[in-house]
Amino acid sequence: MPCGDGDISNKTASILRPHTCQLQGRFRLNGVYQDGDVILGGLFDVHLFTVFPELSFRKEPDPPYCEKFNMESFQHAQTMVFAIDEINKNPNLLPNITLGYHLYDNCLILGMAFRAAISLASGTEESFSNINWDTLAC
């Protein structure tokens, strides 16, 4: 259903900045990045245990952190980086295109994996402009 003039979310977005979407916050994720024309994403369980900080309810909670290194999954991530680097080195494979990557450690926990997947899907830029609002669904 296309966004109409009566939709609250459409009005809120246009009041802030017409034709621009802004990220509301950022996840603190463990990851490795390389810029490119096309970005490939990967989620790996490089750590096997997640430690959740104590909640005081007086300030924003600290993010969970990961422990217990998983060498096999780390090697899988290294393999992906190596493959992307090899593709970028060969000018016959993808001429005039550079592959990049965003690889995240999901710490073997579903919530961390969701955060990483959302970051991959939404990007990491502060704002997005030149959006055709007529084609977006509410």
Image: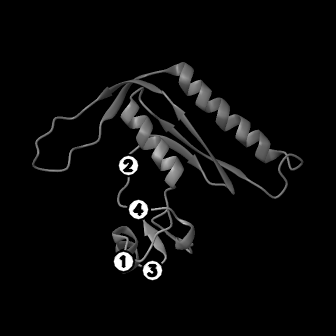
> Could you say whether the residue bearing mark 1 is in a helix, strand or loop?
helix
Q: CA distance from mark 1 to mark 3?
A: 7 Å
Amino acid carrying label 1: it is Leu
- Cα–Cα span, label 2 and label 4: 11 Å
Residue 23's label in the rendered image is 4
Which one is in front in this view, the residue at disc 3 or the one at disc 2? Answer: 3
Q: Which residue is mark 2?
A: 27
* Secondary structure under the numbered disc 3 in the rendered image: loop
In this figure, which residue is indicated by the disc labeled 1? 16
Q: Examine the rendered structure and indicate whether residue 19 appears above or below residue 65.
A: below
Q: CA distance from mark 2 to mark 1?
A: 22 Å
Which residue is labeled 3 in the image?
Answer: 18
> In the image, what residue occupies the spot 15% across and 38% down?
55
Residue at (35, 61) in percent of width and height: 24
Structural crowding at the residue carrying mark 4, measured as other residues with C-alpha within 10 Å and reported as few (<14), some (14–19) or many (≥20): few
Say left or right for 5 vs 104. Answer: left
Q: Amino acid at mark 3?
A: Pro
Dot 2 amino acid type: Phe
| Residue 3 appears in view | yes
Which marked residue is nearer to the observer: mark 2 or mark 1? 1
Q: Is residue 48 left or right of residue 40?
A: left
At x 53% / y 42%, what residue is drawn?
32
